[in-house]
Image (tube, rainbow, N blue to C red):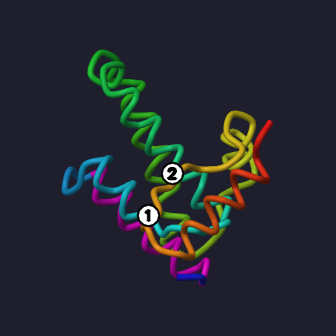
Amino acid sequence: MDDPKECRIIVSELIRKVLVGELSVRDAVVMFPAGTNDKSIEAAFHALIHYEADEDLRRRDILYKEEQDDYLTLIFQTLEQGKELPKNIIKNYEKYYKVADIPMPNDFRSNVIRFWRFLTFRE
């Protein structure tokens, strides 16, 4: 799926389902549209990964939990409209990750994309 707006709407629904407990983060990230170069989707992917990584902290600190829930709600509501995320959210994750490691299907197109990323993002 190459239409960024459609991909953003799909991702918004995945995030919403995580927030209401219908879907685990693990299940949501494997359903992300593969092979996208959309920085908004990549930032949303990283936000979900951090959400899961902070599970213990979320249990101990209710204020942190509420802030993180509000942050993911902002992300899903923006993507739900097909809009790009604010630049500050995107930049917040870009400084830590060159590219999102969104799982891709094992087909020819995905293998070409993986190879290209390997060549392009090596340090």
Nearest to the observer: residue 35 or residue 42: 35
Which residue is labeled 1 in the image? Answer: 32
Task: Residue 80 in the image: state x and y as whole percent.
Answer: 48, 71
- Mark 2 surroundings within 10 Å by alpha-carbon count, few (fewer than 14), some (14 through 19), many (20 or more): many
Question: Residue most toward the left?
Answer: 22
Prevailing secondary structure of the magenta residues: helix
Question: Which region shows up in magenta?
Answer: 3-19
Query: Which residue type carries mark 2?
Result: Phe
Q: Residue at x 47, y 63 (%)?
A: 104
Q: Find numbered disc 1 in the image and state the secondary structure of the residue it sits on.
A: loop
User: Mark 1 near mark 2, Cβ–Cβ under 8 Å?
Assistant: yes
Relative to 77, residue 108 above or below: below
Q: Which residue is mark 2?
A: 45
**Residue 8 is covered by the magenta coloring:** yes
Residue name at image x 74 percent, y 44 percent:
91
| Foreground residue among 48 and 36 | 36
Q: Which one is earlier in the sequence, the residue at label 1 or at label 2?
A: 1
**Percent x, y of residue 92:** 69, 39
Asked if the stretch drawn in magenta spans residue 16, the answer is yes
Task: Estimate the x, y position of residue 53 in percent, counting from the top left.
Answer: 40, 29
Residue flagged by tag 1: what amino acid is it?
Phe
Give the alpha-carbon distance from disc 1 to disc 2, as whole Å.
8 Å
